[in-house]
Amino acid sequence: MYRELGPEDHQKMLGLGPDDLPELLILLGVFDVHRGAERFSRYLENATFSRSETSASGVPYYTGEHRGTRVALSGCFGGPMAAMSAHAWCGAGVKTVVQLGWYGALQFGTDLGDVVVPRHAERQDGVSDWYLAKGILADATPQLANAIAAQLAARGIPFNEHAIYSTPALLAESRDVIADWSRHGWHGVDMETAATFAVAKHFGARRAAALLRVDDLVSEEHSIADGLHGDHRRFMRDREREVMHAVIEAAAETP
């Protein structure tokens, strides 16, 4: 039933008309989806809060602009929430999707705020199997990922392009599990990227991700339980704004 909905159905659920669609959807993977999206909306011009009573994701979203590019911004936590938002927006006709958010480092040598622009994400999110057949990569669109990498490099932001692992169970990560992921070469772990890539790929949309390192799971020098305070907090706020603008400008220049 829902899988057969068309663009007009999804536009109605989002409270939009065909001329209201943004050029870019940014999905923001954060614990507090409402406060996180509100904070990131401040990095847009003319940001407007929207809440459709029939929204498929059940999550409010913001629309705004950056240097003339129309953007929709929606918070999500975990693969199912990311997939519902991505499905609604891609189903409505959005052609470019970028996952922003955080990742935990699985390799040594990363610093707080370093960015990964993953070329693909391991599909252990629990959702992507509904959108892609077994063995199909949940991967980024190369041209968009390349453009994001170029924008980050131009800004002097440290980044890499290694693959990550998307998990459905953050707090179930034990030291043994983390060590196994690290041995297999995954650069980091998040919860949303594989689902977002899978849905966007299913709809034929351009897709990429830019994730900031928040915790170091291999050295255990910092974890999400510690939170961010003082200079670290201010640094991350500045970095997330820079990365968001880099993503939007990259999307604008990608055909």
Image (cartoon, rainbow, N blue to C red):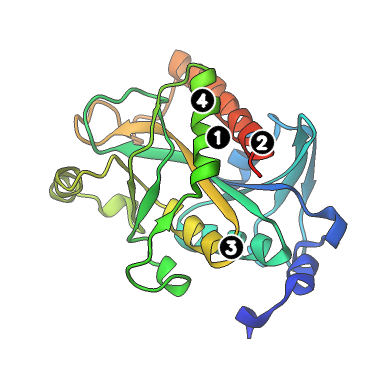
The quarter of the picture where the C terminus appears is top right
User: Would you say 24 lies left or right of 239 here?
Assistant: right
Task: Kindly identify which residue carries mark 3.
Answer: 204
At 60% from the left and 26% from the top, the residue drawn is: 241
Could you tell me if the residues under marks 4 and 1 are in contact, i.e. CB atoms within 8 Å? no
Indicate the position of residue 175 as horizontal and vertical percent values. 15, 45
Q: Work out whether residue 173 or residue 1 is closer to the camera in this orientation and state it.
A: 1
For marks 3 and 4, give the CA distance: 25 Å
> Which residue of the protein is positioned furthest toward the bottom in this rendering?
1
For marks 4 and 1, give the CA distance: 9 Å
Q: What crowding class fits label 3: few (fewer than 14 Cα within 10 Å), some (14-19), or many (20 or more)?
A: few
Of circles 3 and 4, the one toward us is 3
- Residue 21 can be seen, yes or no: yes
Nearer-N-terminus badge (3/2): 3
Mark 4 falls on what kind of element?
Answer: helix
Amino acid type for the residue under numbered disc 1: Ala
Task: Kindly identify which residue carries mark 4.
Answer: 152
Task: Kindly identify which residue carries mark 1.
Answer: 147
User: Would you say 248 lies left or right of 174 here?
Assistant: right
